[in-house]
Image (spheres, grey):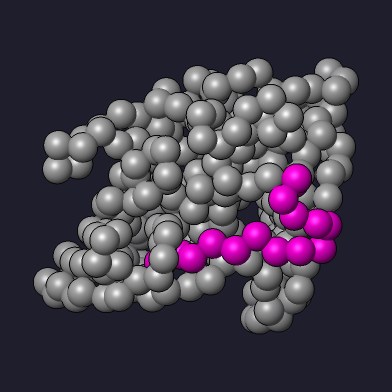
Amino acid sequence: MKIILIYLKAIFFSINLIFSQTSSADFDPFQAGENLEYRVHYGIFNASYASLTLSNEKVDGEDVLLASGYGKTIGLARLFFKVEDYYSSYFESKKVQPKLFKRNIYEGGYTKNLEVSFNSEKKEATVKNIKRGTTDVISTKDNVQDLISSLYYLRKNFSEDDINEGDFFTINMFYDSKNRELALKYIGKEVIRTKYGKIECLKLMPATNRSRIFKGEGSITIWLTNDANKIPIRVQADLLVGSIKADLNSYSGIVSPILIKQKS
């Protein structure tokens, strides 16, 4: 449950533009006021809920977007494993450059409360562990992203025109005080059935290894709407036992209407 919530909020996650009409330099696939809400299913059961909301904020006098992420288990799943996660990512919107990241989570008794300040010029991240009362300064890589800003970076910069099927789109992510490389394999286009109708999507698979949770390579699949928004409309994870699927349940404030090939 913890792993899939991570992908829902950052990878879905939460990874834009109308490439044939507009370039990434003068088009944003998201805006303040966008709100995305997801339902996560384990088999026939509703397992959890997740949301991402964008608003205007300031950090050190600079105008930024604030992506507020929230996730929790619901129904029977909450009785067995309570999750209550809050994420905040403050980032400059044109380059999708994170300035401040906050993570405050409760997952089955496990808690973590972090604040990360990014200095892109010095390539440093100052990590304040509120729970432990410690502060560390850690070197970061070029064009680093936090867990949440990674999604918007993908939506802003991914172009099927610049990548072949089978190739990888890579994001330098800073998460849990470590530099991590997030590699997403582009599978191609696929039309899927959703509650809104048939929608053409861009299909991506994050690189995963076999573990005590996932089956291995190709265990996780992300579908982004192939339109001006590049919204992650579905995420599916094949586990060693069963599978988890997250679907977009409601949305508002998006830049452009979702392109629906055939309504339900």
In this view, 40 is above or below 131: above
Residue at (61% x, 20% y) in the render: 256
Confirm whether residue 230 shows in the render.
yes
Q: Position of residue 181 (x, y in %)?
A: 53, 71
Instruction: Provide residue 247's location: percent of width, then percent of height.
Output: 67, 40
Q: Residue 22 in the image: x percent, y percent?
A: 63, 27
Using the image, determine if residue 157 lies above or below residue 259. Answer: below
Pick whichever, 188 or 24, lies toward us: 24
Quarter of the picture containing the N terminus is bottom right
Q: Which of 227 and 115 lies nearest the eye of the viewer?
A: 227
Residue visible at 50% across and 20% down in the picture: 253
Q: How many marks?
A: 0
Tell me if 99 is positioned left or right of 4 in this view.
left
Give residue 65's position: percent from left, percent from top. Answer: 34, 36
Q: Which residue is found at the position 25% from the left and 33% from the top?
A: 63
Is 175 placed above or below 186 here? Answer: below
Closer to us: 213 or 144: 144
In which image quadrant can residue 23 be found? top right
Looking at the figure, which quarter contains the C terminus?
A: top right
In the figure, is residue 200 to the left or right of 171? right
Q: Residue at x 19, y 75 (%)?
A: 136
Whether 163 is among the magenta residues is yes
Left or right of 86 in this view: 155: right
Q: Is residue 234 visible?
A: no
The magenta stretch spans which residues? Answer: 160-174
Q: Is residue 31 one of those drawn in magenta?
A: no
